[in-house]
Image (spheres, rainbow, N blue to C red):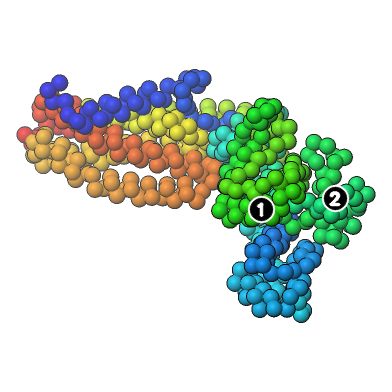
Amino acid sequence: MANLNYRVVIFLFALIFGVVFSIPSLTQSEEGKKITLGLDLQGGLHMLLSVKSEVAVESKVKSIGTSIKYNLEDNEIIFDELKVDNGVVSFELLDNEDLAKVTKLLAEEFKGISVKQDGLNFELSLSPLLVEETKQNAINQAVDTIRNRLNMFGLAEPTVAKQGLDKILVEVPGIKSQEDEQRVRELIAKAAHLQMMAVDEGRAARVDAMSEEEAEQYGDVILRDVNDENIKYLLYSIPILDGSMLVDAKVGYDQQNNQPLINFKLNGQGAKIFGDFSGKSVGKRMAVVLDGKVYSAPVIRERIGGGSGQISGNFTPQEAHDVAIALRSGALLAPVQVEEKRSVGPSLGADSIKASSIALAVGFLMVIIFMFLYYGMAGAISNVALVANLFLILAIMSLFEATLTLPGMAGIVLTVGMAVDANVIINERIRELLHAGNSITKSIEQGYNNAFTAIWDANITTLIAAVVLFAYGTGPIKGFSLTISIGILASMLTAILGTHGIYQWILPKIDKKKLNFWFGIKAEGAK
């Protein structure tokens, strides 16, 4: 043990670490962190979604209306009949002296918006370029939002990717029950569009006798209560603020009834708008609207500062949890609908796992036999490093609960070849130095030094390619790049540091007369 060095200690620690943390994945134990199998290996849910991007354009126009209303009121500009109709925001100034101020405000705060002016009347609409940009943003945002929701839901490595012009591909591994499938579908499709809307107090009493068309003429909208469809509310169609200003949402419980509710928090701008409106509207009602349903419409008793609020609506704990996830991940700018859905069975995965496992085992065994026969004990040392490398890959993937896909398994097989390739280079360098008549000690040290540059260059370029694949790839491509990246880093530790330490440890035991046994060469010339 006298020659035990830090390289051997690190290698032994890495080997023990790899074995211990690989066990849950290898035994599929219920305890401990383990590798998750991807959709192609364990089955799951496959969906193709379409995005109604035209709704995002309507929401954008309403958002502009909300901003204009706030800016006009904040600058104490008197206006009348601010409404949104057919993609146009219109309003009329009541004081000619405000004309220059409004013109400047629109030019500074609403760039890219088409503005038509007729005296004191203004009409604002989106330009064709902005309409197209809004539609594309809605699709791209839907991809990010759905991915965030599924990640927050606790699902491992879902695939969410744009397909074509307005389609989104979603693959969720591990979904087997109808209940889980339904819950995932609802979470994906939930718009989670939060709005604070003022009640039209002057006409609210007539809401039951009012039609949608009549309400629209007044710039209002009729929305129903989430718990009772017979209860209707007459609300100003332009919201006070919307969910784009929301920064957090968490599940809480009502202190009186211990019922689940959702506590939300607004950003600085939202908090200011919320505080200003509530301060001016004491004694009036404000509705909390989520996805077109009124969850509550309390009377404002005092100015509400801090930018915090609550949503209550007889939620179950699971519903409250899912709504909070949807709110935190952001509202969908446009609704999505399922165009195609199918459940992928695990039978293909079982066949794939079996075939890949056989390929890995056969390839691994052939490499081990070749290394031992060709390099002798040097090959055996390389094989020990190869085993440690394999365990390290499994352990690290298990700790991060990474998803293993079929391409990922191919990545492991490829990594085995790359790991042994490093030792082939090292062994050949040592052989060359021994043939040149150098001592065993000098041959080993110079062999590692000479081989390191070539190994480092090859590994670092492959690692860069793997990182790029992981950054820009999706699903299986990410799985492949992940296993390659982990394998490269593990091989640098085992194939270079580990084997070097083993050689230094056993150096006194190496007999220069038995180089054929140790390195697979004749003992001619070695010192």
Q: Which residue is mark 2?
A: 204
Q: Position of residue 415 (x, y in %)?
A: 39, 38
- Quarter where residue 92 is shown: bottom right
In this orientation, does residue 141 appear? no
Q: Earlier in the sequence, mark 2 or mark 1?
A: 2
Compared to 310, does 138 lie above or below? Answer: below
Left/right placement of residue 469 relative to residue 53 reads: left
Name the foreground residue: 265 vs 73: 73
Query: What residue did someone put label 1 on?
Result: 279
Q: Would residue 507 appear left or right of 205 to someone viewing this image?
A: left
Q: Residues within 10 Å of mark 2 (few under 14, many from 20)?
A: some
Q: Quadrant of the C terminus?
A: top left
Residue 11 in sight here:
yes
Q: Look at 82% across and 56% down and name the residue there.
A: 220
Q: Residue at x 71, y 53 (%)?
A: 281
Where is residue 31 shown, x and y percent of the image?
48, 20
Contact? badges 2 and 1 (CB < 8 Å) = no
| Amino acid beneath label 1 | Gly
The disc at residue 333 is none
Q: The N terminus lies in which quarter of the figure?
A: top left
Q: Nearer the viewer, residue 442 or 300?
A: 300
Name the mark nearer the viewer: 2 or 1. 1
Q: Nearer the viewer, residue 325 or 342?
A: 325
Q: Which residue sits at x=38%, y=22%?
A: 20
Mark 1: secondary structure: helix
Crowd band around label 1 with a 10 angstrom C-alpha radius: few (<14), some (14–19), many (20+): some
Q: Position of residue 328 (x, y in %)?
A: 59, 43
Above/below status of 325 relative to 122: above
Amino acid found under the numbered disc labelled 2: Ala
Find residue 245 and report its horizontal and vertical position in percent: 61, 52
The residue lying toward the viewer, choosing from 510 and 281, is 281
Q: Is 454 left or right of 293, judged from the image as shown?
A: left
